[in-house]
Amino acid sequence: MKEPLGIIAGTGFYSIAALKNPEVKVIETKYGQAQVTKGTWHDRTTYFLTRHGTNHSVPPHKINYRANIQALVDLGVKDVLAVNVCGGIDETVPVGGLQVVDDFIDFTKNRISTFFDGDEGVNHVDVTNPYNQDLRKVLIKSCQNLKISVSDGGVYGGFEGPRFETKAEIQMAKKMGVTMVGMTGVPEVVLAVEKGLRYAAICIVANPAAGLSTEEITMEDVQKVVENSAAQVVQVLDEATKILAQ
């Protein structure tokens, strides 16, 4: 019997219809509460966690990332597939396009970004490859099986939010090799690595990043793109879950 699978998603993903026999649970951890939906997906126990809450009430800088990751660990999860809604810098990936990132740069400022703050001792975790290569390959293979275009590899730039980035910040990030910018991927990936989880993320380009389009960035436009892309991303997750169940 395989260990439970963890799915983490944010904007536009508040439930997954493919989960059979869904049951909402509140998990108590030493870092606070985390709400998950338990179900089965291709006969594998799966825990779905929506970062912003079911009514999108939790802003990115207020998410209890440690509680979320600890809850999945306590539930026996070993593999985590994450979905991030991003601003795009890589011009080869269009709005609505997908990218499976393989590295990150942390531009956040005020977040608790480690479990090793003294209470759990001192440890220095290697994050040379923060995104698990095997799970990345599964996400890419899933897209290929479904004939969905996907960009293999990229650098996620994690910003504090909740505001969007400035033009100058995007130009700085671009010069540093960032291909996607978002507000929730970090410290989530770091905490997953610290707890020994296999973690990979697929990113949706919801809008061109600041200054890369003549249009103003609005949440309404972002949500429209996510609504159009959500079904496709769930298809990818379904295929990935099927592959992992083999």
Image: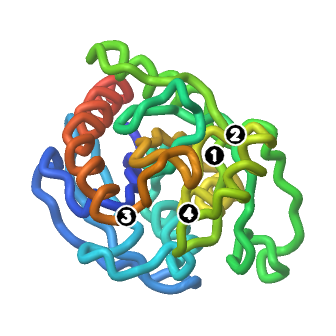
User: Is disc 2 surrounded by few (<14), some (14 to 19) or many (20+) residues within 10 Å?
Assistant: some
Query: Residue 128: percent from the left, percent from the top?
Result: 81, 39
Q: Which numbered circle lies on residue 183?
A: 4
Q: CA distance from mark 4 to mark 2?
A: 15 Å
Q: Are circles 1 and 2 on residues that touch, CB within 8 Å?
A: yes
Which residue does the numbered mark 1 point to in the structure image?
156
Q: CA distance from mark 2 to mark 3?
A: 27 Å
Which residue does the numbered mark 2 point to in the structure image?
103
* Secondary structure category for the residue under label 1: strand
Q: Nearer the viewer, residue 77 or 14?
A: 14
Q: Nearer the viewer, mark 1 or mark 2?
A: 1
* Secondary structure category for the residue under label 4: loop
Residue pushed farthest front? 214
* Secondary structure category for the residue under label 2: strand
The structure residue drawn at horizontal position 45% and vertical position 22%, both measured from the top left corner, is 140
Type of amino acid at the residue the image marks with label 1: Tyr
* Secondary structure category for the residue under label 3: loop
